[in-house]
Image (cartoon, grey):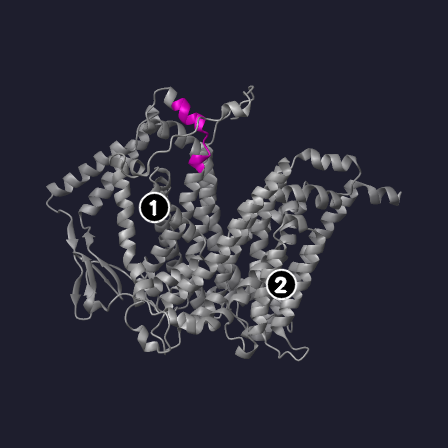
Amino acid sequence: MLRTLWYSTRVRNWLFQIALLGGLAALVAWIVGNTLTNLAARGIRTGFEFLSRPARFPISESVLAYDSADTYGWAFVVGIGNTVFVSALTILLASLLGFAVALARGMGNPLLSALAGAYVTLMRNMPLIVQLLFWYALATTAFPPARQALNPLPGVYLSQRGIHLPALAFEGIAVLVLVALAAGVAAALGRRRFLGRGGLLWPLGAALAAGLALSLLRGSAPSLDMPLLVGLNFRGGLHLTPEFAALMIGLVLYTAAFISEIIRGGIEAISRGQWEAGRALGLTRRQILRHVIVPQALRIIIPPLTSQYLSTVKNTTLALAVGYPELGLVVGTVINQSGQAIESILIMLAVFLSISVSVSLFMNWYNARVALVVR
Amino acid sequence: MTSVTEHPPLAAQTPPAKARTPLVRLLFGDALSALLTLLALGLILALLPALDWAILDAVWRTEDPDACRQGGACWAYVHDKARLILFGIYPPDQHWRPLLVIGLILAMVLASLSPRLWGARLLAIWGLSLLAMLGLMQGGFLGLPLVPTSQWGGLPVTLLLAVLSLGIGFPFAVALALGRRSALPVPRLVSVGLIELVRGLPLVGVLFVASILLPLLLPEGWTIDKLGRTLAALTVFAAVYLAEVIRGGLQGVDKGQGEAAQALGIPFWKTIWHIILPQAIQKVIPPLTNTAIIMVKNTSLVMIVGVFDMLGAGRAAAADPAWPAPYTETYLFVALMYFLICIAISLYSRWLEQTVKNRSHS
């Protein structure tokens, strides 16, 4: 009887699973017990009430307004804001550059494709953090002090203080242009939805032109806000700090190399027969690319592109090596200041997990839309 | 989308040899290619000042740090500090030990290049030689002075972290991959949860957990030094990424293989070890080596928690006030070292893929 039980697969499976579960529960209980003893022994306070205490440390730059009198909680939010901003900008710029590099490799020009190939190999085989530190070292040592700033283009100044650019002054007109753009997007989506087809480009262009024309009629043409050297530093214009500039250059160049490989791989995976069939049907090269190759390549490209975007979001944490205050750096500072290590790290992990989950959900939804429908 | 209609024999299908287009035509054949060529030339021209800085204006050899203040690259500094960058703050009179470790790792890697030698014996030799390397670095016996891990640094730390995290992570990765594919709910949920949790986190976060939280999670008196904690973080990270790669390989193995083994009465673990895993891993050699490259690059992140790997040692070396802040040169040198390691792995991967493919066809 016992012998049959011992050799029964079902009983064995049950025993194995119970043992695994019990072992895990014991491990977790052990860790929690240790932690509680350690915390009590070291007199560390736990709990999240520190979030409402004033932070009293500066954050050098942020998308959201921050003052050192603000709370720890707000400091975390500001860090998250910077992380999201840097991630979104990197993903956008790196996708554009990656697409351009993939094109450069596939255009059949040997010089250009060799150049693009060398770029991709170089970027992919060196750690991102080394590249970021390199750009940061370059930004802080290779350029002159602000008074002798390099001025390669009118209004553009390169110095140790970073990059100063002319800024478009968006007052009044910005609202109009944004409203026009939103209307354009709505119209285009509506047209797609109800008429079945239709490009996004034309309605958007028309909406933008209408917005600009409206703003010109009202007499508030967009004006340029030029940076001016006042004393030892610049005033006005758009200022990119060396930290931000190094971070963006490093992240975009690194990510674009990976994205270009993903795009190239997707396009090369489409069999030559598809091109030939398209040509046999009398389609032009552009038409084949747009209606035959790209829709099929997208299906191959989307999954690896999703994980690339996700790793880009995670890669932004390397900004703490160059001192740009994204979430990782804020968490490090908060731990030093408040000693609330467990809570701070939990917040960081929770934020990244929720970003990862939401990006994958979105990309899965998009993937389901472009996926092959088998009938 | 492959069709199953009958093909004419392959030889008849090969296209006629392509007429070689002359290079001039490729570069300037029509307006578009001429434009692209000009674009490429423009890019190259824009890079020339960097070349100027790196080669023509560079100071290659000097004893005098002030000679480096002319504006060119200061390779003399890299030459002067190479020992510090490569070995960190390891006691200088003991530098032969880390050097020997680097040599041993290289020798072991060279010895395991050919897939013919792979097997349990090679694994055992790897384990023994890694233990020997750690002992050699640490010392404290046979008259070797004791060098605590806080003084280890540079290239040996980078290489040891990469090899150990991948090596220790691999068995865990296999277990996780098998668990994820298991029909039983408990191992499947545990594996999926662990894999997705760690994959959703940045390595910096995992390193924070290991370096700051781990001492809190373990009982009083269980002290793991900083290097050990970072190794633990890297190992967990390597394990989940390897697990996903191996899972891909397991999915590619025909179900009939396992069923046939079962029908022959081969026990479960023997089926896995002798039948499923060899086929699964053979299928995922390129992504496996890719993961190896990623992990080599990832070791550079340990600098953030204060471990003196090659990058950390380079940063410390560049802080010497005698030299004019040669950070750019340091990072270029460190980047070059990483580049050489990674490119070697990827060339090997290509060769290996070819060899394995040839063998399975013959």
Residue at image mark 2: A32
Label 1 SS: helix
Residue at image mark 1: A97
Choose between A37 and A276: the one closer to the eye.
A276
The residue under the point 15% across, 48% down is A222
Where the C terminus of chain B falls, by quadrant?
Answer: top right
Tell me the kind of residue under disc 2.
Val
- The stretch in magenta equals A266-278
The residue under the point 29% across, 61% down is B52
Choose between B183 and A305: the one closer to the eye.
A305
* A157 part of magenta stretch: no
Tag on residue B274?
none
Label 2 SS: helix
In the rendered image, which quarter is residue B217 located in? bottom right
The residue under the point 35% across, 72% down is B325
Counting from the top left corner in percent of width and height, residue A214 is at: 15, 40
Counting from the top left corner in percent of width and height, residue B293 is at: 52, 53
Q: Main secondary structure of the magenta part?
A: helix
Counting from the top left corner in percent of width and height, residue B96 is at: 57, 73
In the rendered image, which quarter is residue B66 located in? bottom left
Query: Does residue B343 sit above or below B147 in this rendering?
Result: above
Left or right: residue B186 compared with residue A147: right
